[in-house]
Image (cartoon, rainbow, N blue to C red):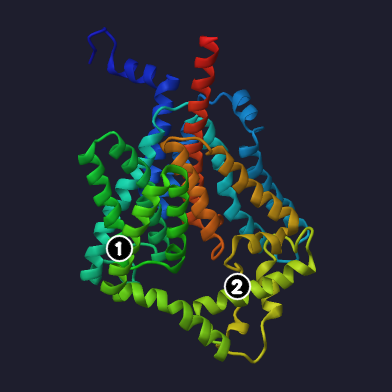
Amino acid sequence: MTTLAGETTGQVLWRRLRSPAAWSETVDLFAILTAASLPWSTSLAGIFNALMLLCMVPFLDVREFLQSLKRPICAAPIALVLLALVGTLWSDAAWGARFYAVNPTVKLLVLPVLLYHFARSPRGHWVFVAFLVSCALLSVMSWLVAFYPDLAIKSDRVEHGIFVKNYIDQSQEFTLCAVALAYPIVQLLRQKRYWIAGLLTALALAFFVNMAFVVVSRTALVTIPIMFGVFALLHLRWRSIAIISAALLVGAVLAWQASPQLRRTADSFASDYTRYVEKGEPTSAGLRLEFWRKSVGFFAEAPIMGHGTGATRGLFERAATSGAQNKASAEVIGNPHNQTLNVAVQWGIIGVAALYAIWILHLLLFRGDGLANWVGLLVVVQNVFTSLFNSHLFDFHEGWMYVIGVGVAGGMVIRAQQAEAKAAEAGS
């Protein structure tokens, strides 16, 4: 079979395979598929991510890529991974536990790769669209599972309205999508494109309604006002802030009155704390307080270099109170449910410095205006504040949300900065 130019189909395919542009498009495709599959499947997200990295190899400009790693936004994540590897040398945990504890940090090595690629690709916004559409479909599935629990893939079906994964992951996704839509909605309203703004507003409200009436995590309840506060301070005038704040307050009151699920979630804060303090029960909030208290003690024992990679569980085993069955003090865990303490226990103040360098450098990267800057900033802000209650940078789902969000948005920001610099040079 030949084409109009006289080439056979095989020749066309071979020429296509040898084209750097074709490989770049393939990398974009797998990045889009990774983002789209993340809300649904850890396995698919891992497979698509591996294929994305594999497709970058044939036409990677090694010298230019290595040069890009010198940027602080790339060097800081790499430094934390290297610290985790070196930290295995002074840990007293079994070697299997040491290398298992290194694994959650390895995803950070993908971040510089995404920054490098999407600084050259014009299709970064499609990754955001894919994630948004995927989360919208998941919200529909969440409602279906709420009414028909037998549809859930999860075998235990303990969590109401959860089709796959868990309510913490789902709340993280819906919160990020709902708040991220605030920027394009405001921009569209300013451009008087009311129909599209209305559709995006309806989509954002759909995420909030799902969290109000189906299921929401307590972490999301705490972080949603903070994320909206960041948006208001950056993108709204004081009068608009006052009007929108009043509207949100009215909406929150109505949701509180109409949703027993929302009231139960909020009331559990106080009840969990009371049961922990008075009876020592291992409630969700109580366990966190217990883990944090013990972790601060572990950090004080080795403040500079920490106890080493993978040492956390052994420390909790030795600190567990004997004879306190079913009590919070008897619980043993390898993750103190706080990102800073997770790092501090293993690698001391050196690790905390590396962790905070990552967050601060990435926040500074997204100081400008535009959708990419807003999404990237929001991803970092969400990760910082939710990491007060979880180790979200090291968790699979939330960690990949951070890597993909910052990597793609950061690459888009760098691409825009480079275009502006070239335009300035041409105009001078």
| Residue at image point 28% right, 62% down | 209
Residue 6: percent from left, percent from top: 26, 7
On screen, residue 241 above or below 186:
below
**Regarding mark 1 in the picture, which secondary structure is present there?**
helix
Find residue 360 and report its horizontal and vertical position in percent.
62, 46
The N terminus - image quarter: top left
Q: Position of residue 78 (x, y in %)?
A: 65, 43
Marks 2 and 1, the one that precedes in the sequence: 1
C-alpha separation, residue under disc 2 versus residue under disc 1: 39 Å
User: Which residue matches tag 2?
Assistant: 333
Which residue lies most toward the front here? 239
> Could you say which quadrant of the image residue 339 lies in?
bottom right
Local secondary structure at mark 2: loop
Q: Nearer the viewer, mark 2 or mark 1?
A: 1
Query: Can residue 368 be seen?
Result: yes
Residue 400 x/y as whole percent:
48, 50
**The residue positioned farthest toward the top in the image shown:** 6
Considering only vertical position in the picture, is 359 above or below 119? below
Q: Is residue 412 left or right of residue 355?
A: left
Disc on res. 251:
1
- Quadrant (top left, top right, bottom left, bottom right) of the C terminus: top right
Amino acid found under the numbered disc labelled 2:
Ile
Residue 33 is marked as none
Give the camera-side residue of 159 and 99. 159
Q: Say if residue 162 shows up in the picture.
A: no
| Residue at figure coordinates x 39%, y 51% from the top left | 241
Whether pointer 2 and pointer 1 mark residues with C-beta atoms closer than 8 Å, the reply is: no
Q: Given the image, on which type of amino acid does mark 1 rest?
A: Gly
| Number of other residues with Cα within 10 Å of mark 2, as a class: few under 14, some 14 to 19, many 20 or more | some
